Structure formats: structure tokens, C-alpha cells
């Protein structure tokens, strides 16, 4: 008989932090930014979010080591940050993957810039300092079996780095990217311009290198003053980044030129991504214009649906959820016709004009339609308006209503769609030995807090004896306002984790959402969960984009996970009603449990709202790689 260790629970909430810790979020940040032991994520939080390219840099936020500290580093070595499960010969793609540039899969060192890495499908940063052996003009050359960039600063500060040589750095410039075999220097971009260096002075250097075929060759040479040939750089002229400073200090190689962003980003910003910034007009402000529905519950409930038959919402205007490839599995959300979208808004505004006689429509942001019966539809209407009482500031109307005619001519409100303004949302994730993704998850949720200033959601992590990272320390040193950590001493099981986490939700009127560790979660996600989840009536099961190897938010090649239902949000009372997740046939695996939950949700009479959630990414990862 196996003795199971009782779970240990740690928590942080706003009340706990204010009452017991007696320190503010700003004080936390000051303390954390001075901690060098794990400063990667605090630097990254300033300069690069998980789903947007780097922005303009305030160089005053970053320390540059002084020369005496640099010279105290390890001579003869450089640092390596390496990311596995990366499939591209182009270095620019590495810069958009989760965790780049500060959160690698592994951290290593090397003692030569003429070396070979036998691993397949990886990308890496090699960085440190170069000591010039003489004063004069130097020229550098690079060679690699796939993409490589060589960055050099004119002083010790990484912020001053410039790209001096490159191979296959971008599809826009490299085309099919012919390989440069080792010791073959046939491309002009493999050579730097002449560069003046001073004897014994340290210069920051960095190589960004990718490889797919297992050859992984790198050769960096220099031509020193007085020499006519390129020579290997001796180890004694290399120094690691000094202790006491973050080796991941930002420098320009982490920025995308604006023309690259414009050319490669298929997903332009949308008002949908910023609705949380606008004040809302509540339904009760115009409720007497919207009558109660005379629709019976059986008319607005789904019959039990078989696998793959859960209908999707249709949307207007185009939400740009189509992907790069053109087959059916990669098509975006079903589009509502412009005629119907405009008609829905016109009918709605006409109906509420008695409550707001001088309302001015500014923009139709989002219309979602869900058909229940041939002549019964539910609409989510999200529009930006000016009102008579506030003509200088935009307000948001975001309401779910029924109509008994298609196209909609009149709307009614049903009690099943009534909820609190901002019900508390819990995001649950299970973790075991995945430090790279654990750090990424916490950074991602930190960004959601920062973007939305929404303090009515919490992260729940169930830690199944992780040995490669201290999850408790990671959470305590984060800026998260609310979190719950459950430590258990048994094999990883999403079912066990889900039910343990569900028990920690204090209120049956809170929403519990089962997430995935390797998700890129947009800042709109928490509000989207609220908008699509109704107590006793509907659950929310968004579909995510599954990226193919080597692709990311900047290169969204992949497919929508239309056949997976591992992401489900419901009110706790509804989870209790369906019994959580059954564990009779699944004990220690991640597979199968999602369909179990989805089927029992439908059998219980609760609807499933299904939409392809904009900017919700399931990042590529291999099953045999611990990250």
C-alpha cells in the first residue's frame, strides 16, 4: 500500500500581503530588483512581454559591470543559455520563442569559439567578454552550419552592442539561407568591418546561434593587428559575465527592427485586446429598456453532444484568428456577416435609446452569436460609446442577451446570464520538473496583472515534487498579488491536481479554470473567461493555437486545437455538481481527462461555450524534454 503525503498549501492574497506582510507591491518590486540570484525574470518583465516584441529601452534601468568586476570573472569561458525544441535555421525566430532571452532550458559554459554541438533542434546565446591582446584594428569572421549572429559592444556595456556579422539571421534577407560549411567563408556578411580595440580592455560579445540537423558547428576567428590571416581566439582572451550582475542584461540584439515587425506580424493590434481599459456601462443602467425573456430553459440548453460536435460562436468583425496555413484546421472563428453584425448593433441601440437618448456609437468591437434553436440566439454585444453624461470619455457596453428572432430585432435578458460584475477567477496549473515553463508561466501571469490591474484572479499551482526549481520561492519572489501553491508527494496527475485545487476555491460563486503549463495566456483571458461563463448555465472551453516547432506568436504557423478540451472554466458550484474530474480510469496521465470533463459538463445540462481564443497559444514542446 502506497502512503501518500498529505498536500501542503501555501497562499498569498491581497489581504494576506497587506495584513501580514505589511508591504506594498512597489516595495516588493524594489526588493526583488536588488536580488541578483535570479534576476533574469525581473529584467525581462521590464523589456519584453511574453507575446509582444521588445519596445524602446530606458537604459537607466540596467547596470553595466565595471572593469574590475569584469576582470574578476572566469577566464577562458563564456556563458551559454540554450533552448531546446527549436526548429529553424533563422536566428530571428529564436528571439520570439517563450523564455528568450532570459529563461533558457539549460545554462552551460564553453571554453572555445571553435566548437561543435551535437544536439538537434536548439537555439542558444553565447555571451561574455572579449579582452583585446593589442591596440589596433581587428576584423572578425564567423562560420556556422546554420543561422548565427555576432554582436560586439564598443565598451563593456551590452547596451552598446552592434551586429557585426551574421548568417541566416532573417528570412527577409536570407531567402533560402544557404549553409556555410565549417571553415568556408563565402558570404560577405560573415566578415565584420575593421574595428578599433584597445589592449586589455573588455568588450561585451554575444553569439546568437541556432541548429536543426545536429552538426551545430561554430567558428569565430579574428585578424589581429599586424596579422594577415584569421586565427582562432585563444581562451585566455575570453571572460564570463561577472557574478553580482545579471548576465541577461538587455542589449539591442533582442529588439526587432520595426520593418521586420510590420512585415512578419499577421495579428495586428485590436480594440478587443484592450477592452479592460474602458469603464463599463452596467445592464441595470438601461435594464428597463431590455425586458425579461419569455424563453424556457429547455429552449436555450444544448442536447448532449457527441465528440467534435460542440458548436462554435460566430464573430463580427473579423478577429484575425486565421493562421498562416490554409487548410480547414487552421481557419479562424466563423465570421458573422457584416450585414447581420451591423443590424444587431442598430437594433440594440434603438432598443436602449429610451435609457440613453443621446448615446453615440464610437466603434463595434466584438459581436458573438450562439444559435440555440432555429429562431433563438444568444449574442455578446461589445461596443464603445459616448453617453450624454460623459461625452469626453469612451464607455464600454459588454452584455450577453437573447433574441427570439434571427436576425435579431429585439433583445431580452434571461436570469441564466446574470452574474456579478467581476467574479473571482482561479487559474489552475500542475507542474513537475519544468523550471523553464514554470518561470514562463509566472512571468506571463505577472504581465496580466500589470496590463489589466485586475486583482480578482489567482494562480493555483499544484507542484508534484519538482526537483529542478523551488516553486514556492518563485512565487514568493514574484509580483503576483494572489496565488495558491499546493505541494503533493505523488506522481503527476492532472485529475489529482484539479480536485485538490478545486477544494482550495473558497466560494461556490468563484470561477475555476483548468489551464496548461505551456500556454501563452493573453491579458484578455481572465475577462474572456468571465464573459463566457454563467453559473448553472454554461462553461467556457476555448481553443488554443498549437504552434509547430520553430514557430511562435510572431510566426503563428500551427493549428487550432479543435479536438482538445483540457481548458475548461466553470463556477465552482457547477464543478461540484458534475463531481470534479472522475479518476476511475485515469490516474497518472495528462491524456483523456479533458474529454471526460467535457462530456460530463454536457451530460449535466450545462452548455459549452467554444471559441478560438485570440492570442491564446499552446507552445511547442516535445514529450521527452524536461524544461
Image: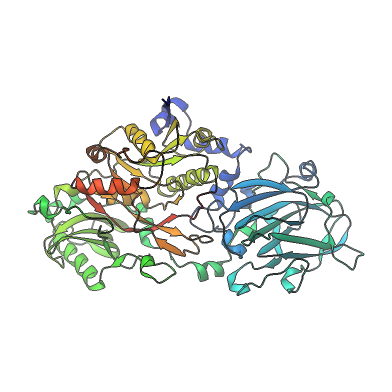
Q: Which residue corresponds to the image point at 89% horizontal and 56% vertical from the top-left?
A: 134
Residue 585 x %, y %: 33, 40
Residue 282 x %, y %: 23, 50
Q: Please identify the residue farthest to the right as the structure is shown.
A: 226
Q: In this rendering, would 370 be left or right of 521? A: left
Please, is residue 21 above or below residue 75 in the view? above
Q: Please identify the residue farthest to the front as the structure is shown.
A: 1
Tag count? 0
Query: In the depicted view, which residue is nearer to us: 503 or 553?
Result: 503
Please, is residue 470 above or below residue 603 in the view? above
**Would residue 299 be visible to someone looking at this image?**
yes
Q: Which residue corresponds to the image point at 60% horizontal and 39% vertical from the top-left?
A: 38
**Would residue 533 be visible to someone looking at this image?**
no
Residue 286 x %, y %: 17, 53
Q: In this rendering, would 331 be left or right of 29? A: left
Q: Quadrant of the N terminus?
A: top left
Query: In the depicted view, which residue is nearer to us: 123 or 37?
Result: 123
Q: In this rendering, would 486 be left or right of 208? A: left
Q: How is the image coloured?
A: rainbow
Residue 217 x %, y %: 71, 60
Q: Which residue corresponds to the image point at 31% horizontal and 67% vertical from the top-left?
A: 317
Query: In the depicted view, which residue is nearer to us: 563 or 137?
Result: 563
Amino acid at each position: 500500500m502506497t502512503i501518500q503525503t498529505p498536500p501542503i498549501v501555501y497562499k498569498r492574497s491581497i489581504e494576506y500581503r497587506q495584513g501580514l506582510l505589511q508591504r506594498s507591491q512597489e516595495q516588493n518590486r524594489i526588493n526583488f530588483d536588488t536580488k541578483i540570484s535570479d534576476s533574469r525574470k525581473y529584467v525581462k518583465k521590464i523589456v519584453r512581454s511574453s507575446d509582444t516584441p521588445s519596445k524602446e529601452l530606458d537604459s537607466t534601468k540596467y547596470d553595466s559591470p565595471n572593469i574590475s568586476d569584469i576582470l574578476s570573472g572566469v577566464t577562458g569561458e563564456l556563458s551559454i543559455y540554450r533552448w531546446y525544441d527549436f526548429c529553424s535555421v533563422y536566428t530571428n525566430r529564436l528571439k520570439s520563442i517563450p523564455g528568450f532571452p532570459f529563461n533558457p532550458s539549460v545554462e552551460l559554459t564553453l571554453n572555445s569559439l571553435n566548437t561543435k554541438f551535437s544536439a538537434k533542434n536548439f537555439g542558444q546565446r553565447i555571451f561574455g567578454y572579449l579582452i583585446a591582446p593589442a591596440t589596433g584594428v581587428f576584423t572578425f569572421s564567423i562560420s556556422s552550419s546554420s543561422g548565427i549572429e555576432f554582436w560586439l559592444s564598443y565598451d563593456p556595456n551590452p547596451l552598446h552592442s552592434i551586429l557585426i556579422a551574421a548568417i541566416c539571421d532573417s528570412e527577409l534577407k536570407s531567402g533560402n539561407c544557404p549553409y556555410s560549411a565549417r571553415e568556408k567563408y563565402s558570404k560577405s556578411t560573415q566578415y565584420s568591418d575593421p574595428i578599433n580595440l584597445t589592449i586589455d580592455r573588455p568588450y561585451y560579445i554575444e553569439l546568437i546561434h541556432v541548429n536543426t540537423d545536429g552538426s551545430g558547428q561554430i567558428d569565430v576567428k579574428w585578424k589581429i593587428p599586424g596579422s594577415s590571416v584569421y586565427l582562432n581566439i585563444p581562451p585566455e582572451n575570453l571572460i564570463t559575465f561577472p557574478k553580482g550582475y545579471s548576465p541577461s542584461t538587455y542589449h539591442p540584439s533582442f529588439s526587432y527592427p520595426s520593418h521586420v515587425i510590420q512585415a512578419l506580424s499577421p495579428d495586428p493590434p485590436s480594440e478587443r485586446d484592450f477592452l479592460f481599459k474602458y469603464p463599463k456601462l452596467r445592464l441595470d443602467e438601461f435594464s428597463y429598456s431590455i425586458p425579461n425573456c419569455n424563453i424556457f430553459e429547455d429552449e436555450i440548453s444544448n442536447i448532449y453532444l457527441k465528440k467534435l460536435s460542440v458548436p462554435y460562436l460566430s464573430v463580427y468583425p473579423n478577429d484575425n484568428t486565421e493562421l498562416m496555413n490554409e487548410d480547414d484546421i487552421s481557419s479562424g472563428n466563423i465570421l458573422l456577416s457584416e450585414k447581420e453584425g451591423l443590424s444587431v448593433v442598430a437594433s440594440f441601440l434603438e432598443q436602449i435609446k429610451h435609457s440613453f437618448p443621446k448615446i453615440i456609437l464610437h466603434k463595434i468591437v466584438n459581436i458573438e452569436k450562439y444559435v440555440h434553436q432555429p429562431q433563438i440566439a444568444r449574442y455578446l454585444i461589445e461596443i464603445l460609446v459616448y453617453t450624454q453624461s460623459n461625452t469626453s470619455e469612451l464607455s464600454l457596453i459588454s452584455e450577453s442577451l437573447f433574441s427570439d428572432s434571427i436576425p435579431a430585432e429585439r433583445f431580452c435578458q434571461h436570469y441564466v446570464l446574470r452574474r456579478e460584475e467581476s467574479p473571482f477567477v482561479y487559474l489552475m496549473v500542475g507542474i513537475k520538473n519544468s523550471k523553464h515553463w514554470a518561470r514562463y508561466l509566472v512571468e506571463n501571469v505577472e504581465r496580466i496583472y500589470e496590463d489589466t490591474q485586475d486583482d480578482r484572479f489567482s494562480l493555483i499551482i499544484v507542484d508534484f515534487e519538482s526537483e529542478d526549481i523551488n516553486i514556492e520561492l518563485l512565487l514568493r519572489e514574484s509580483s503576483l498579488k494572489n496565488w495558491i501553491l499546493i505541494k503533493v508527494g505523488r506522481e503527476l496527475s492532472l485529475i489529482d491536481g484539479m480536485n485538490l485545487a478545486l477544494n482550495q476555491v473558497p466560494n461556490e460563486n468563484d470561477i475555476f479554470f483548468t489551464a496548461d503549463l505551456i500556454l501563452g495566456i493573453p491579458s484578455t483571458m481572465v475577462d474572456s473567461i468571465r464573459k463566457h461563463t454563467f453559473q448553472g448555465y454554461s462553461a467556457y472551453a476555448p481553443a488554443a493555437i498549437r504552434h509547430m516547432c520553430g514557430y511562435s506568436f510572431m510566426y503563428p504557423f500551427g493549428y487550432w486545437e479543435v479536438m482538445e478540451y483540457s481548458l475548461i472554466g466553470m463556477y465552482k458550484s457547477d464543478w461540484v455538481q458534475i463531481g470534479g474530474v472522475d479518476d476511475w480510469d485515469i490516474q497518472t496521465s495528462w491524456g483523456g481527462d479533458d474529454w471526460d470533463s467535457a462530456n460530463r459538463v454536457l451530460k449535466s445540462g450545462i452548455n459549452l461555450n467554444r471559441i478560438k481564443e485570440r492570442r491564446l497559444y499552446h507552445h511547442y514542446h516535445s514529450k521527452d524534454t524536461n524544461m
